Amino acid sequence: MEHDHEKNDAVGGDSDLSRNSITLSGAVAMGTGVMIGAGIFALTGQIAELAGPLFPLSFVAGAVVTALAAYSYIKMSNAWPSSGGIAMILQKAYGPGTVAASASLLMALSMVINESLVARTFATYALRPFGLEENTLLLSVGAVVLIVFAYLVNAAGNRSVSGFSLIMSAVKIGGIALFAIAAIWASGFSGGAFAEPVGMQGAEAFIASVAFSILAFKGFTTITNSGGEIVDPHRNVGRTIMIAIGICVATYLLVAVAVGSSLTIDEIVEARDYSLAAAAGPALGDAGFYFTVVIALAATASGVIASVFAVSRMLTMLTDMKMIPHSHFGMSGSIRSHMLIYTVVVAGVLAVLFDLSRIASLGAFFYLVMDMLVHWGVFRHLRHEVGAKASILLVALAADAVVLAAFTAVKLQSDPSIVLYALAGITAVFAAEHMFLRRNEADASQRHNHN
């Protein structure tokens, strides 16, 4: 297993020369690019729908749970930085078997789901100025166009992704902060959602909203999955993750307060797929509305590009480790180039088939299950080797479990079919991986006997 890991540390680069080519600032840009693309523009309305006037606090709770979760990833990445690092963590913890392969694939799928979520958000904001955001066909076309663009940028190489992400992150974080401060200045703190009584459906609904908040922060795994390509990874992976989470929670809080001061909860829910643009109108007028739309397009575009970069490398590593099947389908080029294509094809299909709410819910289920398997694996098998504290690992595991239980209970009431889709998807992943790995073992045994 150690030999396999060493062999695969280089997986995900364009060549040996491309390894360790992403700077600290570039890695932070990629992480925040994924987080802010999904968290602010795609999920604010859905979080407010569950948490009510307290929805800004849901982002704080999500940041706390994410910071606890990041502990496992940082400890593992400091010990063994690797491109496709979550697959490495799981293989180290569980060995090259069904659990590691299935959980790794769940992580990859949750990232692809995130791409489709953010791509549909991009299309929603692009169509909003024309009043066409409800047009299903145009939403699908817009989402697919962005996914294809993300493929082209990624196909150009690592430095193109890093440079593009850095520029776009600076633009969007500055733009979002400017929007938020201006909206708060115009509206104050006494109107909108914050003038309403706190009447949540209950604590369960608030805790369930944290599942979406966690999804809004899960972009930090983009950094883990690119660990082998970050300059001085033993030192910089952990620093990058915590800086990215810090930037994002500050940005999320600013925006949540701005939206909540401009719109009532009912208005936020009604415009939940484009809540920032809706909030900009009454607070800042037409200029603020169009400014917010432009920032949203920049944020979501960079988020999809960064996510495609990370998931394609993770899938490449899983293929090289023989943890998932691979077919060239007659295509030339490297496995990484094939994985880029497979990633954008699956993301495009999901963006066409599902709406924003259901895409987000499916991603939350997949991610939380995978995250719990990571914490349990590190606690059970690796905490002494990487110097991790058992108490922190168990608290992170318990936090995920509580959020997952509350989220499942709420979804069983409001959208039970998505719970069934998630359960069926997770079961299918484990069953398919089990059959694939058993077949590989049988083939290897036959070759050995033949020789």
Image (tube, helix red, strand yellow):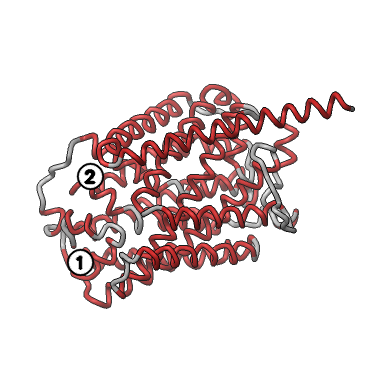
Kind of residue at disc 2: Ala
Q: Position of residue 183 (x, y in %)?
A: 23, 66
Determine the residue located farthest toward the bottom in the rendered image.
287
Give me the residue at 31% from left, 59% from top. 273
Relative horizontal placement of residue 425, taking residue 419 as reference (left or right): right
Give me the residue at 69% from left, 30% from top. 439
Nearest the eye: 186 or 323: 323
Nearest the eye: 82 or 276: 276
In this picture, is 341 found above or below 90? below
Tell me which corner region of the image, top left, top right, bottom left or bottom right, holds residue 125.
Answer: bottom left
CB contact under 8 Å: marks 1 and 2: no
Relative horizontal placement of residue 429, taking residue 21 as reference (left or right): left
Give me the residue at 38% from left, 36% from top. 420
Kind of residue at disc 1: Trp
Q: Position of residue 392 (x, y in %)?
A: 43, 29
Residue receiving disc 1: 185
Q: Can residue 250 be seen in this view?
A: no
For the N terminus, give its image quadrant. Answer: top right
Tell me which corner region of the image, top left, top right, bottom left or bottom right, holds residue 129.
Answer: bottom left
For the C terminus, give its image quadrant. Answer: top right
Relative horizontal placement of residue 1, taking residue 45 as reference (left or right): right
Q: Residue 51 carries which label?
A: 2
Relative horizontal placement of residue 395, taking residue 426 as reference (left or right): left
User: Alpha carbon of mark 1 to alpha carbon of mark 2: how far?
Assistant: 24 Å
